[in-house]
Image (tube, grey):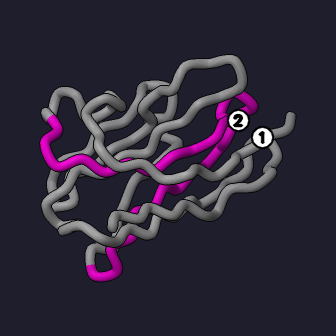
Amino acid sequence: QVHLVESGGGSVQTGGSLRLSCAASGFPYSNYYMGWFRQGPGKEREGVAAIYSGGGLTDYADSVKGRFTISQDNAKNTLFLQMNNVKPEDTAMYYCAAGRWVAPSRMLVGDEYRYWGQGTQVTVSS
């Protein structure tokens, strides 16, 4: 059974940092694309960052480039999102997702991903 469990969310002030984690189990992690998505209040879900767990391929939304970094610990099947210099517009529920057959050009498209976690809330205050 596939499990994706996010952690690390919380409240932070503008300019601060957070590190989100996603513990994955129940599927062959090293062959999957892994992504972070978010949905803010009154907004549609958007792709934030994604990585191919086999290595060498990442993608970021323009809104987070230079501020967020996606990484992973393949030995522990864990995905991370380091969030630096956060802004109030980063406030959202953040979800971890996994997909086996993701087109590299569509790594930030949620429909490409099969498995989803329950999310962790990030709130940025000004």
Residue appearing at x 34%, y 80% in the figure: 76
Q: Position of residue 53 (x, y in %)?
A: 21, 60
Task: Tell me, yes or no, whether the highlighted magenta stretch contains residue 88.
Answer: yes
Residue placed farthest to the right in the image? 126
Q: Position of residue 41 (x, y in %)?
A: 71, 25
Q: Position of residue 73 (x, y in %)?
A: 33, 73
Vertical position of residue 84 compared to residue 79: above or below: above
Amino acid type of the residue that numbered disc 2 sits on in the rendered structure: Thr
Taking the image as shown, residue 25 lies to the left or right of residue 122, namely left
CA neighbours of label 2 inside 10 A, class few (<14), some (14 to 19), many (20+): many
CA neighbours of label 1 inside 10 A, class few (<14), some (14 to 19), many (20+): some
Residues 39 and 15: in front is: 39
Residue appearing at x 68%, y 56% in the figure: 9
Residue appearing at x 41%, y 29% in the figure: 61
Whole-angstrom CA distance, mark 2 to mark 1, is 5 Å
Q: Which residue is mark 1?
A: 124
SS for callout 1: strand
Vertical position of residue 54 compared to residue 62: above or below: below
Q: Position of residue 122 (x, y in %)?
A: 70, 46
Taking the image as shown, residue 53 lies to the left or right of residue 10, namely left
Amino acid type of the residue that numbered disc 1 sits on in the rendered structure: Val
| Residue 91 image label | 2
* Residue 113: quarter of image: top left
Q: Which residues are magenta?
A: 75-102
Which quarter of the figure is the N terminus placed in?
A: bottom left
